[in-house]
Image (tube, rainbow, N blue to C red):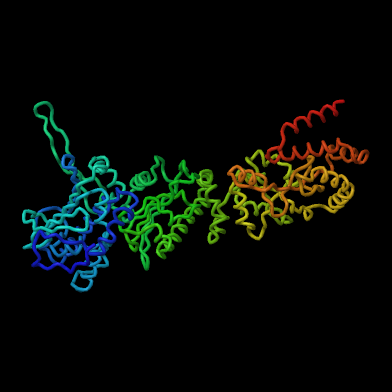
Amino acid sequence: MSEETQPETEEAAAGAEHSFRAEVNQVLDIVINSLYSHREIFLRELISNAADALDKLRFRAVTDEGLMEGEGELEIQLAPDREAKTLTVIDTGIGMTRDEVIENLGTIAHSGSRGFLEAMAGQGNAGSDVSGVDLIGQFGVGFYSAFLVADRVEVRTLAAGEGQTGWLWTSAAHGTFTVDEAPEWTTRGTEIRLHLKEEHHEFLDEWRIRELVRKYSDFVSWPILLEVTTEEGEGDDKKTVTKDETINTASALWRRPRSEIKDEEYLEFYRHVAHAPDEPMETLHFQIEGTTSYTGLLYVPKQAPWDLFERERRQGVRLYVKRVMIMEDCKDFVPDHLRFIRGVIDSDDLPLNVSRELLQEDRTVRTIRKTVVNKVLAAIEQMADKRKDDYAAFWGEFGRVLKEGLHTDFENKDRLANLVRWPSSTEQLTSLAEYVERMPEDQDAIYYAFGTNRDAVENSPHIEALKKRGTEVLYMTDPIDEWAVEGIREFEKKPLKSAMKADLDLSKEATDEEKAEKEANEERLEDLCERAKTILVDDIEEVRVSNRLTDSPCCLVVPEGGLHAHIERILRAQGQDMPKQKRILEINPDHPVVEKLHLMHAADSDGEEVGDWFRLLHDQALLAEGSPIADPATFARRMTTLMQRALE
């Protein structure tokens, strides 16, 4: 590895071989093999540098009109050559002198753009207000991405202005480069010719180039022209024609004022970034200026993407830095519970070579993320308040996702609690605020129950007493609901209570007569409960008299600190090693089956038949809550035996 060379002098021999500066040799291999995860990114980098050169020329020409003299419109041209296996990127921008070629292309992480800004700011020239110059190439490694796909790169350049000479820079990235005088090069600007590696000849295909420009550089403000070869005429008059075609829109939609953008343009851009044929439910377009400057164009889709709940799902918005796309799915701006949002964020303050690791630590990113969340939640809140039908449709598509935030987004928990919707025993879909508004004055809790679907919860024995009293019960049928209610715990000073847990206390809503009757039943059935606990000792924690049952003989309830049965089933299905959870068996003192068992126990305290009945009731309770029976064959035989006895 060569030592760092001193800056070249004008007296150095033209065409001499130069060593890359030491930092280039140390970092170039990392740039080529590790810095970029997708090799296609090279085109984005080269187009960004070309656009930067055009911006420099336009800015300096404000005070030096002579720089604009010469051939060429301000544009970027892409010229694939299938025979030569080369792809050429040409701009008609500011160009480079020989010293600039050696300095800019011989030193990694040296930013010509940054140096240009610093120089112009230091000159203090009239009209040199660099704050308004939107340069997109303020980094120093982008050029070397060319070696991701090319084994040799040639750069021909001519600096703007009179009396300049063209120069040719050549390198195969093996530690050296050459700089030769190129007097035949008389076009202002820079041409970068890539001799593509055999495995990267796909980048010569017209469709592939169009795809990459549309994906990464569609909104570069300069026209990007593609050299296209077509056949014209017929028969003997048929001839090959080469012409240039503009393949980008040359306008960053999100950077334009809302008043200048048509609804059709918003719709087309949504379909582009969301890969969706439908229309968005909400469009959010905002521009923030101040300590941190950024622009956002975000969409709330109308339909959920197919991979919304996939582990390797596409998530987040596109990140642009000064109109150049850096990441297609930047997750750092959008929390998981808003992962359905699509669109772009364009920052003026982040570097173009920012990595995901840097994004996670960046204060600017945290500021942008907070704005994104606030804007999205405000739009959803307005929809919920003003367009209830639209919100019902939105909730049907994304409600399960939004509920995740109740457990993870503590800062916005109250806002999310107002947005959440559940079906209930009286409504198809209700908010917590609407539930509280309908509550009787003497009801001091919001009740809910779990199940696999509405019918399962509606027919659950756990809510029989609540329904009989006319108490509204929320039906929770999503796996996420267990964690969602844990995140809320209370709403408008009303605690959320599960109708399926052991601590359900209905005594405040009971009459004195009902309280006295419950105490009498507990005393009357104390021996029967002890007998049942002995019989089911391996499966249950306790047997007790219930005040929540009216029609069913029994049910299983969750002890303090335990998981609801359907959550336990979900975790087991996911392969988690769940220890056996013993629940509490509650029996209905007024049910004929329980009354008969009480008589049987009194007549024969050691008889086997009482045990068979309690085992059958336990299995029945498991079925009612949707849980599997440990031994279905034994259950079937026991049921057959008891049916025969009953028929006899």
Q: Is residue 300 above or below residue 295?
A: above
Q: Is residue 239 above or below residue 313?
A: above
The quarter of the rendered structure image containing the C terminus is: top right
Left or right of residue 469: residue 265: left
The number of callouts visible is 0
Query: x%, y% of residue 244?
Result: 17, 44
Query: In the image shown, does 187 or 455 lie closer to the viewer?
Result: 187
Visible residue check, residue 134: no
Query: In the image shown, does 630 or 298 lie closer to the viewer?
Result: 630
Residue at 9%, 27% (x, y): give it: 236
Left or right of residue 592: residue 291: left
Left or right of residue 546: residue 328: left
Query: In the image shown, does 600 or 264 lie closer to the viewer?
Result: 600
Q: Residue furthest right?
A: 603
Visible residue check, residue 370: yes
Query: x%, y% of residue 524?
Result: 90, 47
Q: Quadrant of residue 619?
A: top right
The quarter of the rendered structure image containing the N terminus is: bottom left
Q: Residue furthest front?
A: 1
Q: Quadrant of residue 134?
A: bottom left
Query: x%, y% of residue 62?
Result: 16, 65
